[in-house]
């Protein structure tokens, strides 16, 4: 299980930024979308996600905004910033390159 958690941690920023590029979302909504879109194969606990959100805010990749829901309840929505879109493009390209390299290694038959 620890291996899966380490792999997930490395992908979290990529996936969060990808979702936020499509629309602003609040924390619980992000976890639900990840689970839904992965058909239950990628489950991210909120306790794991929030440190990633805070790091992205600190790096000015995303911003947060409190919105009033109903009369008293507020939600914090996250929004991708231009720097976050640039970063997403970079890490996505790196992800594709790394996964291609891993596939080549795993499928290598020798000469």
Image: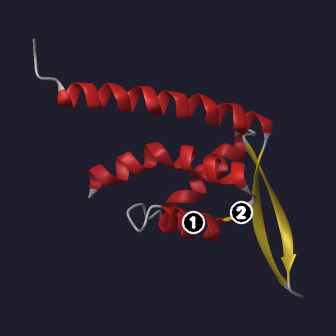
Which residue is painted at 57% across and 65% down in the image? 33
Q: Farthest residue toward the top?
A: 111
Where the C terminus falls, by quadrant? top left
Disc 1 element: helix
Q: Say whether residue 73 is left or right of residue 104.
A: right
Residue 89: percent from left, percent from top = 63, 32
Residue at the spot 64% in from the left edge and 47% down from the top edge: 17
Kindly identify which residue carries mark 1.
Answer: 33
Q: Position of residue 1 (x, y in %)?
A: 26, 58
Identify which residue, 76 or 91, lies in the foreground. Answer: 91
Specify whether 57 is left or right of 110: right
Above or below, 14 relative to 64:
above
Asked if labels 2 and 1 touch by Cβ distance under 8 angstroms, the answer is yes
Q: Badge 2 is on which residue?
A: 25
**Colouring scheme applied when the structure was drawn:** secondary structure
For disc 2, the neighbor class at 10 Å (few under 14, some 14 to 19, many from 20) is many
Q: Provide the secondary structure element on which disc 2 rests.
A: strand
Q: Nearer the viewer, residue 75 or 97?
A: 97
- What residue lies at 62% left-to-right and 47% top-to-bottom? 18
Q: Is residue 52 left or right of residue 108?
A: right
**Picture coordinates of residue 64, whole percent (x, y):** 79, 56
Quadrant assignment, res 74: bottom right
């Amino acid at each position: 299980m620890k291996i899966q958690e380490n792999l997930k941690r490395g992908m979290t920023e990529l996936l969060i930024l990808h979702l936020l590029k499509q629309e602003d979302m609040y924390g619980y909504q992000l976890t639900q979308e990840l689970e839904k879109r992965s058909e239950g194969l990628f489950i991210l606990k909120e306790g794991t996600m929030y440190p990633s959100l805070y790091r992205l805010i600190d790096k000015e990749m995303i911003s947060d905004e409190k919105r009033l829901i109903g009369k008293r309840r507020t939600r914090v929505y996250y929004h991708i910033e231009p720097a976050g879109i640039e970063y997403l493009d970079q890490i996505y390209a790196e992800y594709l390159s790394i996964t291609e390299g891993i596939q080549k290694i795993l499928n290598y038959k020798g000469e």
